[in-house]
Image (spheres, helix red, strand yellow):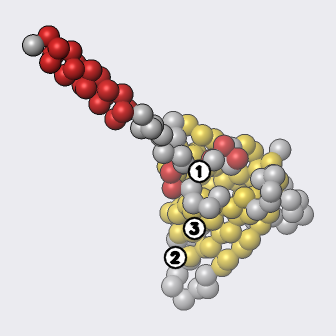
Amino acid sequence: MRRFLLILLMLVLLTGLLTSCGTTIVPPVGPDVGKFVGLWVNQNQLDPIISKCKIELVNDYLIIEIWAKCGSGDCYWGEAMIDSKDVIDETIEVAWEGTSGFGTYTQKLTLINNQNKQLEIETVFYPYNPSSSVVKVTEYFKKV
């Protein structure tokens, strides 16, 4: 009887060891959103539409703030919050509602070089008046 219990115990231990071998729990890997974090300044200092963009990472969310060029200074357009899991192929997509004098506008923020020191922001403005034209602007930013 002892021998039977000893063999049974050994089988249970071996089964436990064998089933745990090679089983590794790997957390899902999300996009490297840290590359976006920082203050980005428009490379076109003469006639920019958007003057700067600030991106912060807070609890897996990207906080995006945009400023536009207004006369001799900057006008704050607002803040958007994007889940970091929604960053796809080093691109962030943001939809804004009525903060710039237009009805709505969308932006695509894309890292565009190997060192990720350059950001492309493509903005599409949709006017309140349906008979007005949609305006699309692409600007380039460098991290400071």
Dividing the picture into quarters, in which one does residue 77 lie?
bottom right
Residue 71 seen: no
Q: Residue sitting at 52 percent across and 81 percent down?
A: 129
Q: Nearer the viewer, mark 2 or mark 3?
A: 3
Dividing the picture into quarters, in which one does residue 19 lie?
top left
Q: Percent x, y for residue 32?
A: 63, 47
Q: Which residue is mark 2?
A: 128
Q: Earlier in the sequence, mark 2 or mark 3?
A: 3
Q: Mark number for residue 136?
A: none
| Horizontal relation, residue 94 to residue 35: left or right | left
Farthest residue in the left direction? 1
Camera-nearest residue between 25 and 39? 25
Camera-nearest residue between 70 and 116? 116
Amino acid on which the number 3 mark rests in the picture? Thr
Q: Residue sitting at 71 percent across and 51 percent down?
A: 53
Q: Which residue is mark 3?
A: 106
Q: Percent x, y for residue 30?
A: 54, 48
Q: Which residue is mark 1?
A: 31
| Horizontal relation, residue 80 to residue 2: left or right | right
